[in-house]
Structures are given as C-alpha cells and as structure tokens.
Image (cartoon, grey):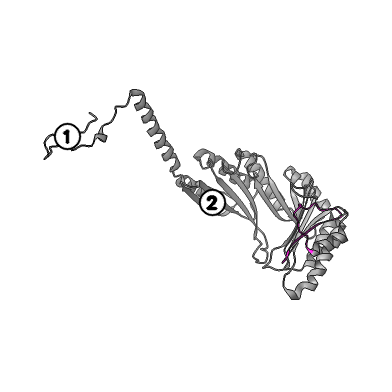
Amino acid sequence: PCRLPRRASILEGMPTHSPHTECRRLTPIQRMIATATVLAIGLTASGCFLDRRGDAEDLERHVRALPGVAETDMTYDKNFTSGENFDLNVTLRQDVTETQIREVGKYFADRTDETGLAERSADLSLRLPIVPPPPKNLYGQDYQSAFFSRGAFSTTDNPTGDEVADDAAAWLRMARSPIVADAAMSAPTWNGAGDSHAVRITLTSTATQSDALALQAREPMLADASWGISVQGDPENRPQTYYASPRPPRDEDLRTWRKVSELLGPYAEATGQTSVPAAQGEQAETVVEFSLPTDAPSQPQARRTAFGVPALLQRFGQPVSVTIRTGEGSAEFIVGGCYRHDKDHHALPLEVELSADFEKC
C-alpha cells in the first residue's frame, strides 16, 4: 500500500501522517522504463570509472623489455573531468634498428586497441638521443622526437599498428641522415586522418638545398614537410628560426637568414616561414617577425636593425610580410608588396618610414 499507516494520536480522530505521503503505483511500462534508466546510468558510471592502469603498466613493462629500448616512463590518469589519458615516453638506444623501432610502434598501437586505452587518448613519444649531446640551453633538447597520437581526443581515426610501425621506421631514417640536425614528427596531425603527418626538418649548417631535395625524394612522408635552420647565439634565449614548406629553402635563403640573425644579435626573438601557397590569413608566402629592444641606450642600434633586416630580406626575391614588435606596438609592412591594413589601423611613425622605403603600393 502507498498510504503510510496512521499512528496513535493524543488527539482522537486526528491522523499524524502528512497528506503528501500518498503515492501512485507505477504502471508496468513505467516500471520497465525506470529499470532501464537505472541500468543505463549504472553502466555509464562503471565505464567512466573503469581503471586501465594495470593494462598501461603491463604495456610499459613489455615495451621496456623490447630490444632497442633504453628506458621508458609513463603517465596514466583518469578522472571524471578529462577522462582517460595514457602517455608513454620511450628513450631509444642509439643503435636501435628499423626492425626494432617498428616492433615498438606496432606493439603500442595494437595493445592500446586491444585494452581500450586508445578509446580517448593514448600517446607514444619516441626519443632518439643526440650524440654527442648538444650544449645545455633553455630551449634546446638533447634528443630527436616522434610523437604518435591515438584516440578520439586528437584524431578522427586511429592509425593502424602497421602504419605506426612504418612511420616510426621512416622517422628513424630521417633522424639519422647526415644533413639533419633534428627531425621532429607528429602523426597524425591534430584532428587529422590516421595517415596524416606533420614533419619539421632542421638542417645542419653544411646542408644544401640539393641535399634536402634528395632526402625528400627518398622519403614520401617529407613531401609536405617544413625545412629550415635554427640559429641560437645565446643558450638562454630562443633560437632564431626559418623554415620553408613544402620545398626546401634555397641556399641563398639560408645564407640570408644567417645574415639576418647576425644583424639581430643573440637576444632578439625572430621567426621566418615560407609556405606555398601562403598560409591562411597571411598576405605573402614568406612571413618574418622579429623584436627590437625597448631600452633607451639600444635605440640607435634598434633603428639600424629595423631598416637593415628588410634590406636583407629583399634577397628572397619575392614579397616578404614583416612584423616588427617594438615597445610602442607593431610595425607591419611588406617588402616588395603592399600591406592591406584594417580600416582602424594606426600606423607607427616607424611603420610609415619603412613602408615608404620598402613597399611597392
């Protein structure tokens, strides 16, 4: 019965229960719906809190024992807010073979599928130590790296074990090329298909465009890679980098960037990028950004740099979009072209002068 029983009352004839304690009986259909809802909530909750740490630890132990592996470390985390995340870092032996690195990549991919670790986010980082180790600095690494992502968090579909194995072997060949100072690879690209890649090749100081083109021809993965150089004059400051994609930069362009870096000095931040076709939102295929010092004693040299760098960039032989960051704001113009500013743009006096000297409007 739904009605609560009455209790004895000191006031004869007055019930002590509330009239709101009455309830209705559920119909058979309502009971079926309620039961199904409770079961669904229970299953969802159990899935959310299913812990695969043991699977992750077993996977790490197996990879650590594989030939060609020097050491491993892993991170496994699962919570209600961000879900399940598994990261495995693998430091390779310097003498690792292609067969061995293929086994590492394939096992990681296959096992994360089998255990369900790849449902949301499972990442593998392969690290090949640089020999001899470079001088220590704040922005450099002592290894080359390849990063493989699996799971719905970062990719539209997971690469297969064979695809990961093939990519890992290709990356190892690139990293060991005598013209490569650093080979960095991510596969797949963010929210990209399982067979997508992002590769950045930093060339040695003696590498030429013909050397890079030969390597590109041997490795299909490098068809749309970024190629360039990284110049670092001070270990506590960011390197000044220039990259081009998909075609490796001309020797003259590399010499020009080294001249730009020399003029800027070791403390200025500077980046350059040539993308064909031009990157989305950019007004030229080649884009250069650099900063100028803001302290008063440096202003004479800063002014010489502001005009000297664009003069050097004319050697690229094509329009170059330039952004100079100063203490008063940014100066934007195109060497050999005409910058299209927003209608509410306020030009700095420096920008007006540089535009008059270097733009063709």
- Tell me the distance, in whole angstroms, between the alpha carbons under discs 2 and 1: 71 Å
Q: Three-letter amino acid code at disc 1?
A: Arg
Could you tell me which quadrant the N terminus lies in? top left
Q: Considering only vertical position in the picture, is 132 above or below 51? A: below
Residue plotted at (87% across, 59% down): 358
- Closer to the N terminus: mark 2 or mark 1? 1
What secondary structure is marked by label 2?
helix
- The x and y percentages for residue 209 are 82, 52
Residue most extreme to the bottom: 297
Residue closest to the eye, 124 or 18: 18
Q: Is residue 338 magenta?
A: yes
Is most of the magenta stretch helix, strand or loop?
A: loop
Q: Three-letter amino acid code at disc 2?
A: Arg
- The x and y percentages for residue 74 are 52, 52
Q: What range is drawn magenta here? A: 327-348
Residues packed near mark 1 inside 10 Å, few (<14), some (14 to 19) or many (20 plus): few
Q: Considering only vertical position in the picture, is 99 above or below 325? A: above
Query: Tag on residue 6?
Result: 1
Residue closest to the eye, 112 or 59: 112
Q: Is residue 158 magenta?
A: no
* Among the 4 quarters of the image, the one containing residue 207: bottom right
> Which mark's residue is nearer the viewer, 2 or 1?
1
| Circle 2 residue | 64
Q: Considering only vertical position in the picture, is 134 above or below 177? A: below
- The x and y percentages for residue 43 are 41, 36
- 278 with respect to 81 (left or right): right
* Among the 4 quarters of the image, the one containing residue 180: bottom right
Residue plotted at (55% across, 50% down): 88
Residue plotted at (36% across, 23% down): 29
